[in-house]
Structures are given as C-alpha cells and as structure tokens.
Amino acid sequence: MRGQEENQGFMFTYLSSEQRVPEDHRLRMMKAFADAFLKEMNPTFKVMYSNTGRPSIPPERLLKAQFLIALFTVRADRMFCEQLDYNILFRWFLDMNLEEPSFDATSFTKNRERLLAHAVSLKFFDAVVRQARKQDLLSDDHFTVDGTLIDAWASMKSFQPIEPSQDSGKPPQDGGSNPNVDFRGEKRSNKAHRSRTDPEARLMRKGLGKEARLSFLGHALMENKNGLCIDLKVNKATGYAEREAALDMLSRQVRKRVHPKTLGADKGYHASDFVDGLRSMNITPHIAQAKNRNTSGLDGRTTRHAGYAVSQRIRKRVEEIFGWFKTVGGLRKTRFRGVERTQEYVFMLGAAYNLLRMSQLVPTGGGT
C-alpha cells in the first residue's frame, strides 16, 4: 500500500534526542568517556571563568564541540554552529535539548581561546591514552615515529622579505588589494623572508622535485600493538625538526614512567645524533638505513634480528594516522595560524582517532 505524504507537521513531539540515537552507536562510548573526563576537569573549569558577568558557552560543550568538528569533518566553526541548529546527533552529544538556540559563531571561536590557555586539549588527549592503557590496548615496549608536512593557512604572496624594500610602500600598479606578483628569478629563503599572514610558517619541500610550500611539521608517536597514537607534536618546518620532536616525545613518555625498548622510523631519522640520543635513553633504533651512510649504533648487530624486520613492517601503519588526520580531520591544510593553535587542534584529532580505534577494538567497552 502506498503511503500518504503528510504535509502538516506535528505541533508537539514526545521523543527525546536520546531515543533518536541507536543503542550501538559508537558515539555513546565516546560520550561516556568525555563526560567522565569533563567531570574530573571541573576544578580547572572553575578557575577559567569569573563568578560575575554574563554566562558564556559552557566549557564542557566547547570541548565536546571541538571533538565533533574533528570527528565529522566540519570545515569551519561557523559551519558547525549552523549544523548544530538542525543536527539532532550533535545536540544529543552536547546535552542540548531541541529548543535551545545554537551557538553564536563569533562567541564560539573567542571562547575557545580559554581551552587553549589552559591546555585542555592536551589533558583530554592524555586522558584518552591513559584509558587505552587501562584497557591493555597499548604497547609499552615498541613504538614508531614519523612526521608529515601540514600546509599553513597562508599564500605564497604573503611570503615577503623581512626587511621591506623601498618600493614596498607604493600602491600596486594594477590596483586592488590582491595585485599580480611575478616571483620568477627571485630567490626566497626562510632566513630573509617571512609570511605576513602566519610568521611561524616556514618554506619547505616534501622531497626532490617537489614545490616548496609554507608549512608546519606534524609528528606522531605510535605504539606498535594496535596503532594508537600516544603523543603528537607540531613545530616549525626545519630540516632537523623531526628528530628533535621525536626525542622530545620519547622524553615525555619516560617522564610518564613508560620506557620504550625499540623505535621504528624511516630513513629521514638515520642520523648519528639521533641514534646516539636513542642509545642514551636505552632505546634500540629500528631505523631504516639510508644508502652509503654508516652510523655507529645502527649496524648489522641491530638489523640482523627479527624484531628489526617486524618494526620496519609495522612502522608503515603510522601513515594511517596521518591519512585520517588529513582526510577526515581536515589537516591537509590547517585552518589555524601559528604552531600553538594548530597543536591544540592536532591533540583533539588524536583523541578522536584513538577513541574511534578503541571503539573498534573494544566494541562493548565503556568510557569510564
């Protein structure tokens, strides 16, 4: 029998958003974990706000909103505030009823600065890692490190000499605020030039024959058991930033009383100073060997073992993290200016990625 279309909507509804979300939806586990963490963060939230003035967006909703933006590939804060007006799943996750108005996009963006000032994203990411360790999903012995380029939110036209020329103050000949610029024959470098849009962005190329772009470097430390990321770092794009970031992330794990035994990496990490740094931390370097490069501490005594071959095979899984970050998380080109804001978003991406993986590894697991 053909159904009839009802053009007149109901005046009243007796269904809550809780009834609209399936019982086996993966967001239920993530919501339970996020709510438990936010309850522990209540003392920090009290310090963040004054006791007087107009009420702002609750910090609990701010943090969970950042999580939704990362998980559902929302391209901008304004777009999220628009979707929140009609997306029942988002409202359920943020504990909002269907009658509450959506967030104002400007207030939402400005209130997020409070989370940045108190490193809430880092604390949330660390809480996810602790939960994964509690559920015995992490390896404390074998790890992998790698880096990737993140395009900065700045155009090549903004990459201008630090010391402006005499003609820099003249108006463009073709008029307008976006003049035509011919860079042919001009030599530009990070020493003599800076981006006017994002001064922390650096010019860097991915490899030989590739074009140079204004970029940041993102780094991930992955455990080899289930491919979860246990630490993330964003810094300026330089030739030695990868190795420095790797040692910093490993030192952070040691301070947490995690003592890695091996570290897998590609040829970009095959340098004597990095190998010596790993050996000083009692970590065996399972690094891919570059041709015609002999390094003390990385020779046949290390590469002959079966564990070295296993690390070289598993280390390629770190590309899955970067692939998810850049496609689902929208990190192929960052939406933020500066290292600090990009780092904050990367921690939220890491928390979302880990929770999604955990929901697959432990389908019936809870977040508490």
Image (cartoon, rainbow, N blue to C red):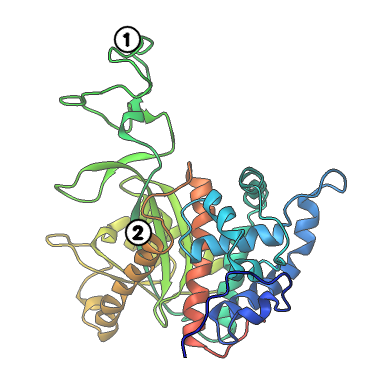
Quadrant in the rendering for residue 311 = bottom left
Which one is in front in this view, the residue at disc 1 or the one at disc 2? 1
- Tell me residue 77's x, y (percent): 55, 51
Using residue 159 as the reference point, say whether residue 3 is left or right of it. Answer: right
Counting every numbered tag in the picture gives 2
260 or 11: nearer the viewer: 11
Kind of residue indicated by mark 2: Gly
87 or 316: nearer the viewer: 87
Quadrant in the rendering for residue 344 = bottom right
Q: Categorize mark 2 by other alpha carbons within 10 Å: few (<14), some (14-19), many (20+).
A: many
Q: How far apart in space, not on screen, are marks 1 and 2 (Cα)? A: 39 Å
Q: Residue furthest right?
A: 52
Residue depicted at 22% across the width and 77% down the height:
303
Using residue 117 as the reference point, say whether residue 154 is left or right of it. Answer: left
Residue depicted at 62% across the width and 69% down the height:
8
Residue 176 disc label: none
| Location of residue 264 with respect to 110 vertically, above or below | below
- Tell me residue 90's x, y (percent): 60, 67
Kind of residue indicated by mark 1: Asp
Q: Which residue is mark 1?
A: 167
Residue 147 disc label: 2
- Tell me residue 33's x, y (percent): 64, 76
